[in-house]
């Protein structure tokens, strides 16, 4: 559901994936997730923020099902700078090791 140009979604729209495991609401450019948007996963995880060519790219927050969230700068689906926030609002920096581990559940 959204705006189409030459049979390709462009502009603001909503896309539910066929397996119903993900729902995206936000901006599209030539059929790709691009601009501001939110992707919700069936397991309760969701990402809100900037997108480029179907990847988290720019500023955004990844909300985990257990209540924690990762806020920061993303590039090609990977966290490049940010912090993890625990439910108690206690903040801790994420080191290189955690950043590389986080990419496995993002992409």
Image: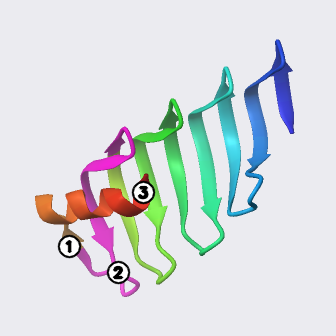
Left or right: 103 in relation to 81: right
At label 2, counting other C-alpha atoms closer than 10 Å, the crowd grade (few under 14, some 14-19, many 20 or more) is: some
Of labels 1 and 3, the one closer to you: 3
Tag of residue 72 = none
Sequence-first tag of 1 and 2 = 2
What SS does tag 3 mark? helix
Asked whether the beta carbons under mark 1 and mark 2 sit within 8 Å of each other, the answer is: yes
The x, y position of residue 15, in whole percent, is 76, 45
Q: Which residue is mark 2?
A: 86
Looking at the image, can residue 78 be seen? yes
CA gap, disc 1 to disc 2?
Answer: 8 Å
106 inside magenta stretch: no
Q: Residue at x 77, y 53 (%)?
A: 18
Q: Residue at x 63, y 61 (%)?
A: 40
Left or right: 82 in relation to 45: left
Q: Which residue is mark 1?
A: 92
At label 1, counting other C-alpha atoms closer than 10 Å, the crowd grade (few under 14, some 14-19, many 20 or more) is: few
The x, y position of residue 70, in whole percent, is 36, 64
The residue segment tinted magenta is: 74-91
At label 3, counting other C-alpha atoms closer than 10 Å, the crowd grade (few under 14, some 14-19, many 20 or more) is: some
Of labels 2 and 3, the one closer to you: 3
Q: Residue furthest left?
A: 96
Q: Residue at x 41, y 63 (%)?
A: 105
Sequence-first tag of 1 and 3 = 1
């Amino acid at each position: 559901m959204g705006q189409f140009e030459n049979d390709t979604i462009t502009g603001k729209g909503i896309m539910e994936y066929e397996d119903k495991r993900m729902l995206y609401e936000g901006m599209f450019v030539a059929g790709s997730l691009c601009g501001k948007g939110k992707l919700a996963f069936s397991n309760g995880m969701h990402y809100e923020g900037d997108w480029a060519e179907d990847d988290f790219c720019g500023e955004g927050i990844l909300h985990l099902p257990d209540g924690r969230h990762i806020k920061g700068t993303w590039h090609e689906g990977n966290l490049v700078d940010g912090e993890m926030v625990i439910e108690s609002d206690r903040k801790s920096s994420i080191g290189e090791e955690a950043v590389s581990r986080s990419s496995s559940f993002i992409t």
